[in-house]
Image: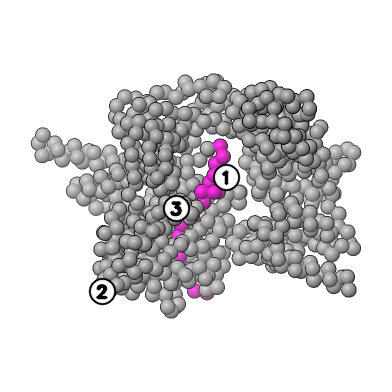
């Protein structure tokens, strides 16, 4: 092969890599997963070498940061005052120590060690103590303006006790626990992508329903504050101002290797509870690094550098692709392979996310693959070593693994998913039943997904109302099921009897209305109660009984605009309206929720305020986690027993917002502050009540 032909072939490969990585990068920063981290890093390193040999400055992909910001709806593009460069990366601890030793302090100097958080980088600008701008990193120069969304992100204060200009950079991310809560049906690829999509959402209800945390990792600019010439001290200063801040440790360079080994232990990473993909070291004495020059892509590695863990990869063979159906109809692919040992645990399965992800890997049964643990925690496929051999099957003809009906392929912004459209699919029915008996729904204890499936297979449960008609006639069938017995049956009957007494909030949650979870119901139910005898009186049933479900029916029949309720926009209003029509007005077309009503007794009661009780005339709003009461319902009952009233949203009529995190930057705290309404903790509330009660008794 001639040199010219060799160069042409190599340049052609360079251009192919650029195109692949450009698409994967844009998918990554805009909420989709089309390439594994392992494959991306490998191709990036290969392209970096090629661009050094054949690339052109200004065109090189590996000189870019992130991906271009998209102008989505009303989210405007903004140019960063301070360019948000990506850090240089290494997988060598020795290289890291070498770079950190280049100042005059050598190995006797100190570095600041922290997590390399895996979310979405956000830059915040404050002036005169108020947040002026929150923007995503984008391509490092231009990002998206998400200022209106920032108030819903925990760890971003709207106001700080510092009246000059201040610029902060940090990561908006979602915990694994929150991701698992939201991803029960396997709809989302990972916590990082869901965090990215959430912070840029046009619908702020998504931010109200999903918990996103902000962790500052750099104080970019600050005016006229002394004593901030240490990187670690700058992070502590941000914490004092009320920002969420990344965990960090000041470490002597000579001890950095041991510290990195300690921070990199799987148990230490797991305990964090957030996605991380490495560590960051920043030289602590900023006076010694402020003039060091980096490249167009990243700052000087002596100033700051990322340490990427060496992903332990193991070769194995793909034996099967299982398809796991969910309550929503989404069918999620799972790779099953010969068992391997990864990070001390046996692994034989890994999520494949969606059909687009599978197509990118060209996966076929029998392929030789490599697997690893992303962020040292989650099993993932790294590479398909047989990617170029053969062609994967066409899944358009795939049958649902549960009902065998043909599936459909949905394309959502370039991401293909497999969906079962059969409303009678057993997997959907099982998901509906499991959600119905959940503790936040009808709260029938002792029924797992497995036991419900067994009851269905044995003909004991054929429709939702069967849960409430179980009695002695079913005992023999029940106890004949393996693993179940008389005691379990007795406990189940007792739990069912208890579940027959409920309230509208729990019942509506049990119905699984699309997009309407506990957060929305805690706005809907108080709205109904607050306005039952006033503005909603015209929608009540003819007998005038206190019936919140009947009220919803009347509102729907009269064309009520449900977007009047706080937190309910056009999409959720339609979902609520469709549910009322299908399940309550014309239940013959529904899933059978209405049939359950004959067995239920609702405890919803009109809110009456006894003038002789201590909290008469007082209205409270409760938000956040509780510490002194068992749950929110218990505190609501307590306040109402004292003549008070609990509302779901803060308004000018609210007497106090009860939140144990009084410095929270949540939407409710912000609204309370704007209206001058006091924010008190549970302890403050109980103390005020006791003092009031004692005065009245004297």
- The circle on residue 267 is 3
Residue 675 visible? The answer is no
Badge 2 density bin: few <14, some 14–19, many ≥20, Cα 10 Å = few
Q: Name the quadrant of the C terminus.
A: bottom right
User: Who's the residue at 31% across and 40% down the image?
Assistant: 19
| Residue marked by disc 2 | 104
User: Who's the residue at 60% across and 25% down the image?
Assistant: 425
User: In the structure shown, which secondary structural element does the residue marked by tag 2 occupy?
Assistant: loop
| Residue marked by disc 1 | 181
Q: Earlier in the sequence, mark 1 or mark 2?
A: 2
Q: Nearer the viewer, mark 2 or mark 3?
A: 3
Q: Quadrant of residue 235?
A: bottom left
| Above or below, comparing residue 353 to residue 257 in the picture | above
| Above or below, comparing residue 317 to residue 549 in the picture | above
Q: Earlier in the sequence, mark 3 or mark 1?
A: 1
Q: Earlier in the sequence, mark 2 or mark 3?
A: 2
């Amino acid at each position: 092969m001639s040199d010219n032909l060799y160069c042409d072939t190599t340049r052609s490969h360079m251009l192919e890599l650029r195109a692949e990585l450009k698409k994967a990068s844009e998918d990554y920063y805009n909420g989709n997963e089309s390439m594994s981290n392992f494959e991306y890093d490998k191709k990036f390193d290969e392209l970096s070498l090629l661009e050094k040999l054949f690339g052109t400055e200004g065109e090189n992909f590996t000189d870019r940061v992130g991906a271009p910001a998209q102008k989505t709806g009303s989210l405007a593009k903004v140019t960063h005052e301070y360019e948000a460069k990506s850090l240089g990366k290494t997988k060598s601890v020795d290289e890291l120590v070498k770079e950190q030793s280049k100042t005059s302090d050598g190995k006797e100097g100190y570095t600041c060690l922290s997590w390399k958080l895996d979310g979405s980088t956000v830059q915040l600008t404050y002036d005169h103590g108020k947040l002026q701008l929150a923007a995503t990193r984008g391509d490092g120069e231009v990002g998206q303006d998400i200022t209106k969304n920032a108030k819903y992100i925990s760890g971003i204060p709207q106001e700080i006790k510092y009246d000059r200009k201040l610029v902060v950079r940090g990561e908006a991310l979602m915990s694994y626990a929150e991701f698992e809560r939201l991803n029960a049906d396997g709809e989302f690829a990972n916590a990082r992508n869901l965090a990215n999509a959430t912070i840029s959402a046009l619908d702020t209800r998504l931010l109200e329903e999903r918990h996103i945390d902000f962790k500052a990792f750099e104080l970019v600019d600050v005016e006229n504050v002394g004593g901030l010439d240490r990187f670690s001290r700058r992070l502590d200063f941000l914490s004092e101002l009320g920002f969420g801040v990344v965990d960090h440790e000041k470490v002597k360079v000579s001890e950095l290797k041991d510290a990195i080994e300690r921070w990199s232990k799987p148990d230490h990473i797991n305990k964090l509870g957030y996605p991380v993909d490495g560590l960051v070291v920043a030289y602590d004495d900023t006076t010694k690094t402020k003039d060091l020059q980096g490249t167009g892509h990243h700052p000087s590695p002596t100033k700051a550098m990322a340490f990427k863990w060496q992903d332990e990869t193991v070769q194995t063979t793909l034996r099967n692709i299982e398809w796991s159906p969910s309550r929503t109809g989404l069918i999620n692919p799972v790779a099953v392979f010969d068992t391997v040992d990864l990070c001390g645990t046996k692994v034989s399965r890994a999520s494949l996310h969606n059909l687009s992800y599978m197509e990118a890997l060209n996966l076929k049964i029998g392929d030789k693959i490599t697997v690893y643990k992303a962020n040292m925690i989650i099993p993932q496929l790294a590479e398909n070593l047989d990617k170029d051999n053969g062609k994967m099957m066409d899944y358009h003809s795939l049958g649902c693994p549960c009902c065998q009906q043909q599936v459909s392929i949905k394309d959502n912004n370039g991401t293909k998913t497999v969906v079962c459209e059969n409303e009678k699919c057993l997997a959907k029915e099982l998901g509906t039943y499991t959600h119905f008996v959940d503790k936040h729904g009808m709260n029938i204890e002792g029924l797992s997904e497995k036991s419900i499936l067994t009851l269905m297979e044995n003909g004991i449960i054929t429709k939702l109302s069967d849960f409430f008609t179980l009695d002695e006639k079913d005992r023999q069938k029940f106890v004949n099921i393996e693993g179940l017995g008389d005691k379990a049956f007795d406990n189940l009957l007792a739990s069912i009897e208890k579940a027959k007494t409920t309230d509208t909030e729990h019942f509506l949650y049990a119905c699984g209305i699309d997009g309407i979870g506990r957060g929305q119901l805690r706005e809907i139910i108080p709205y109904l109660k607050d306005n039952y005898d006033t503005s909603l009186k015209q929608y009540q049933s003819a007998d005038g009984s206190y019936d919140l479900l009947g009220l919803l029916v009347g509102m729907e029949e009269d064309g009520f605009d449900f977007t009047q309720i706080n937190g309910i926009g056009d999409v959720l209003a339609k979902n609520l309206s469709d549910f009322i029509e299908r399940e309550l007005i014309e239940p013959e077309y529904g899933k059978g929720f209405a049939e359950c009503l004959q067995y239920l007794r609702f405890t919803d009661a009109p809110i009456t305020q006894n003038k002789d009780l201590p909290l008469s005339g007082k209205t409270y709003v409760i938000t956040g986690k509780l510490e002194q009461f068992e749950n929110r319902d218990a505190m609501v009952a307590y306040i109402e027993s004292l003549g008070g009233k609990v509302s779901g949203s803060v308004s000018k009529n609210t007497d106090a917002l009860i939140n144990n995190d009084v410095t929270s930057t949540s939407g409710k705290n912000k609204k309370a502050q704007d209206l001058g309404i006091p924010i008190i903790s549970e302890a403050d509330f109980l103390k005020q009540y006791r003092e009031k009660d004692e005065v009245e008794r004297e």
